[in-house]
Amino acid sequence: MDIRDDAFRDVRMERNRQVLLALGGDTEAFDRSNSANDWIAYVNAYLGRAARKVYRNDHEQQKFRENMVKAAALCIAAIEAHDKGYFDVEVTDGQGPSTTPCAVAARTNGGCV
Protein backbone atom coordinates (compact mmCIF):
# COMPACT_ATOMS: atom_id res chain seq x y z
CA MET A 1 0.00 0.00 0.00
CA ASP A 2 1.30 3.46 -0.83
CA ILE A 3 0.58 6.96 0.43
CA ARG A 4 -2.27 7.54 -2.04
CA ASP A 5 -3.93 4.27 -1.05
CA ASP A 6 -3.71 5.34 2.58
CA ALA A 7 -5.32 8.70 1.77
CA PHE A 8 -8.17 7.12 -0.22
CA ARG A 9 -8.72 4.56 2.54
CA ASP A 10 -8.96 7.30 5.15
CA VAL A 11 -11.38 9.35 3.05
CA ARG A 12 -13.57 6.27 2.52
CA MET A 13 -13.52 5.53 6.25
CA GLU A 14 -14.45 9.14 7.06
CA ARG A 15 -17.31 9.07 4.56
CA ASN A 16 -18.60 5.85 6.12
CA ARG A 17 -18.34 7.46 9.57
CA GLN A 18 -20.34 10.46 8.36
CA VAL A 19 -23.08 8.21 7.02
CA LEU A 20 -23.28 6.21 10.26
CA LEU A 21 -23.50 9.40 12.33
CA ALA A 22 -26.46 10.66 10.31
CA LEU A 23 -29.59 9.12 11.81
CA GLY A 24 -28.21 5.61 11.86
CA GLY A 25 -27.01 5.84 8.28
CA ASP A 26 -30.02 7.54 6.67
CA THR A 27 -28.55 10.67 5.07
CA GLU A 28 -31.33 11.15 2.50
CA ALA A 29 -33.24 13.94 4.29
CA PHE A 30 -30.07 15.89 5.03
CA ASP A 31 -28.61 15.36 1.57
CA ARG A 32 -31.87 16.46 -0.12
CA SER A 33 -31.95 19.67 1.92
CA ASN A 34 -28.61 21.01 0.64
CA SER A 35 -27.86 23.08 -2.42
CA ALA A 36 -24.56 23.06 -4.29
CA ASN A 37 -23.59 26.17 -2.33
CA ASP A 38 -24.36 24.43 0.96
CA TRP A 39 -22.00 21.57 0.08
CA ILE A 40 -19.30 24.03 -0.94
CA ALA A 41 -19.71 25.85 2.38
CA TYR A 42 -19.34 22.59 4.35
CA VAL A 43 -16.18 21.64 2.46
CA ASN A 44 -14.75 25.14 2.82
CA ALA A 45 -15.37 25.07 6.56
CA TYR A 46 -12.98 22.13 6.91
CA LEU A 47 -10.51 23.60 4.45
CA GLY A 48 -10.56 26.82 6.48
CA ARG A 49 -9.94 24.87 9.64
CA ALA A 50 -6.98 23.18 7.96
CA ALA A 51 -5.62 26.59 6.94
CA ARG A 52 -5.98 27.93 10.47
CA LYS A 53 -4.04 24.90 11.68
CA VAL A 54 -1.19 25.83 9.37
CA TYR A 55 -1.16 29.55 10.16
CA ARG A 56 -2.21 29.54 13.82
CA ASN A 57 -1.09 26.23 15.19
CA ASP A 58 -2.65 26.76 18.61
CA HIS A 59 -6.14 27.66 17.29
CA GLU A 60 -7.25 24.35 15.80
CA GLN A 61 -7.49 21.10 17.75
CA GLN A 62 -7.68 18.78 14.73
CA LYS A 63 -4.64 18.15 12.64
CA PHE A 64 -4.23 19.47 9.08
CA ARG A 65 -4.53 16.01 7.54
CA GLU A 66 -7.69 15.18 9.51
CA ASN A 67 -9.42 18.33 8.26
CA MET A 68 -8.34 17.59 4.70
CA VAL A 69 -9.75 14.04 4.96
CA LYS A 70 -13.04 15.42 6.28
CA ALA A 71 -13.21 17.96 3.44
CA ALA A 72 -12.51 15.23 0.87
CA ALA A 73 -15.21 13.00 2.38
CA LEU A 74 -17.69 15.87 2.19
CA CYS A 75 -16.75 16.32 -1.48
CA ILE A 76 -17.71 12.67 -1.98
CA ALA A 77 -21.00 13.28 -0.16
CA ALA A 78 -21.74 16.25 -2.42
CA ILE A 79 -20.98 14.19 -5.53
CA GLU A 80 -23.26 11.41 -4.24
CA ALA A 81 -26.10 13.90 -3.61
CA HIS A 82 -25.66 15.48 -7.03
CA ASP A 83 -25.58 12.12 -8.79
CA LYS A 84 -28.81 11.12 -6.99
CA GLY A 85 -30.41 14.26 -8.44
CA TYR A 86 -30.91 16.02 -5.10
CA PHE A 87 -29.75 19.33 -6.55
CA ASP A 88 -28.70 20.73 -9.86
CA VAL A 89 -26.22 23.38 -10.82
CA GLU A 90 -27.74 25.73 -13.36
CA VAL A 91 -25.81 26.62 -16.47
CA THR A 92 -24.73 30.26 -16.33
CA ASP A 93 -22.61 30.46 -19.47
CA GLY A 94 -25.21 32.29 -21.55
CA GLN A 95 -26.24 29.12 -23.37
CA GLY A 96 -29.67 29.03 -21.76
CA PRO A 97 -31.11 27.14 -18.83
CA SER A 98 -29.93 23.72 -17.81
CA THR A 99 -31.83 20.82 -19.32
CA THR A 100 -30.89 18.23 -16.72
CA PRO A 101 -33.91 16.38 -15.30
CA CYS A 102 -33.55 18.07 -11.91
CA ALA A 103 -33.44 21.57 -13.39
CA VAL A 104 -36.43 20.90 -15.64
CA ALA A 105 -38.40 19.50 -12.69
CA ALA A 106 -37.52 22.55 -10.61
CA ARG A 107 -38.87 24.87 -13.30
CA THR A 108 -42.00 22.86 -14.13
CA ASN A 109 -43.27 21.53 -10.82
CA GLY A 110 -41.31 23.41 -8.21
CA GLY A 111 -38.72 20.86 -7.22
CA CYS A 112 -36.47 17.98 -7.94
CA VAL A 113 -37.90 14.72 -6.63
Image (spheres, grey):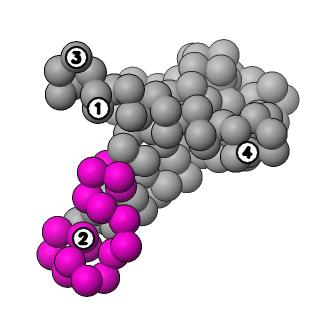
Q: Quadrant of the N terminus?
A: top left
Query: Which type of secondary structure does the marked residue at label 2 adopt?
Result: helix
Residue 94 can be seen, yes or no: no
Answer yes or no: do the residues labelled 4 and 3 have beta carbons within 8 Å?
no
- Please tell me the numbered disc located at residue 7: 1
- Residue drawn at x 17%, y 21% is 2
Of 85 and 56, which appears nearest the observer? Answer: 56
Answer yes or no: do the residues labelled 2 and 3 have beta carbons within 8 Å?
no
* Between discs 1 and 3, the one toward the N terminus: 3
Which residue does the numbered mark 4 point to in the structure image?
A: 22
Q: Quadrant of residue 7?
A: top left
Q: Which residues are magenta?
A: 52-68
Closest to the camera, between mark 4 and mark 1, is: 1
Please provide percent x and percent y for residue 60. Answer: 33, 75
Query: Which type of secondary structure does the marked residue at label 3 adopt?
Result: loop
Query: Which type of secondary structure does the marked residue at label 1 adopt?
Result: helix
What kind of residue is marked 1?
Answer: Ala
